[in-house]
Every structure is written in structure tokens, then in C-alpha cells.
Image (tube, rainbow, N blue to C red):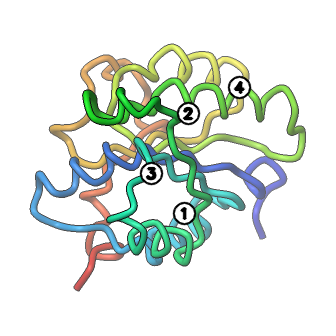
Amino acid sequence: MLSMETRNNLGFVDGQNLYLGTRQDNWIVNLSKFKVYLKDKYSVSEAYYFLGYLQEENEELYKDIQKAGFIVLFKEHTQYAVTKKKGNVDTDIVFEIMKNLLDNKNFDKIILVSGDGDYKKLVEYLIAKNRFKKILFPNKKFASSLYKKLGSEFYDYLENIKVYIKFQ
């Protein structure tokens, strides 16, 4: 039986970071297996998958992410910005996490999937408030050095579990 502390956690996935971080190590995450892993290992009841922007040619990908059980959120861009820059979702993830802290009292802790150092202040704040479970880095090379002072109880590497969550 799960403890009260860990039975209703929320997951937040930086989709581009996950994709690039695992591709760099020559493997691809099976999102259905990954969603089950998040639920079983970290009691994630809702998992949000953030993407840079909506593109018609990726419609099947978006459907696959949703079929795997993720809630897909896109970064809002002007048409000009879509063609000129990458879809940086960091502020959107921080906003959604903070919104949940303020408005959603029905969750216990946050699980973040990214290696991006931009989340360091957020992670430290969540730890101080006892609302942070774990950051999952796509691979060791993608883990920002800003997280070096985190205790090992607060992070893990997806490459350590890739045998369970990769496409065969």
C-alpha cells in the first residue's frame, strides 16, 4: 500500500528535452510504457507533456502521446515566432506547476522530466515546501550541472530504466 504522501503525484514532461536527451543516446521512449512507469513507480495520476508548438504534420505524434495517457499542452506562439525559434516550454511548465500549487490541493508531489537547468529555482522551492518527488533526467549528459547539489533521492536518469521504457 502506498503512503498518503505519494499516492497522487503530478508529472510534467519537457517533451523536446525528453526526445533530444534519449535520441542523443540512440534510443526512443515508448510513451505508453513510460506513462505506466510513472504511475507505478511515482504514483503519477496526471502527466502533462509539453511541446513547443502545434504542427499539422505531427498530428499522429500528438495522438500517440494522448493515447499513451499524457495531457498534451502546447506553447502559444505567434505565427512569426513559430518559424523563427524553437518551442521553449520552460515558462509554461513552471506556470502550470505553480498554478497547481495554488489552485489544486488534490495532489501530493511533483515529478519533472527534463535535464534543463532553468528549473533549478523551482525544484529548490518545491523541495523546501515538501512538494517535490523527483527530477528524471533523460541521460547523464543532459543533466544540468546546476542540479549537482541535489540529494540523490531527488533525481534519477531515464537511461537507468531504459530497458523498461524503450521501444523494442
Q: Earlier in the sequence, mark 3 or mark 4?
A: 3
Sort mark 2 into few (<14), some (14-19) or many (20+) by Cα contacts within 10 Å: many
Q: Earlier in the sequence, mark 2 or mark 1?
A: 1
Check disc 4 and give the amino acid type: Met
Q: Which mark is residue 93?
A: 2
Nearer the observer: mark 1 or 4; the answer is 4
Sort mark 3 into few (<14), some (14-19) or many (20+) by Cα contacts within 10 Å: some
Q: Earlier in the sequence, mark 3 or mark 2?
A: 3
Residue 147 image offset from top left, x and y in percent = 35, 23
Check disc 1 and give the amino acid type: Leu
Q: Which mark is residue 46?
A: none
Nearer the observer: mark 3 or 4; the answer is 3
Residue 82 image offset from top left, x and y in percent = 35, 35
Nearer the observer: mark 2 or 1; the answer is 2
The residue under label 3 is 54
Q: Secondary structure at mark 1?
A: helix
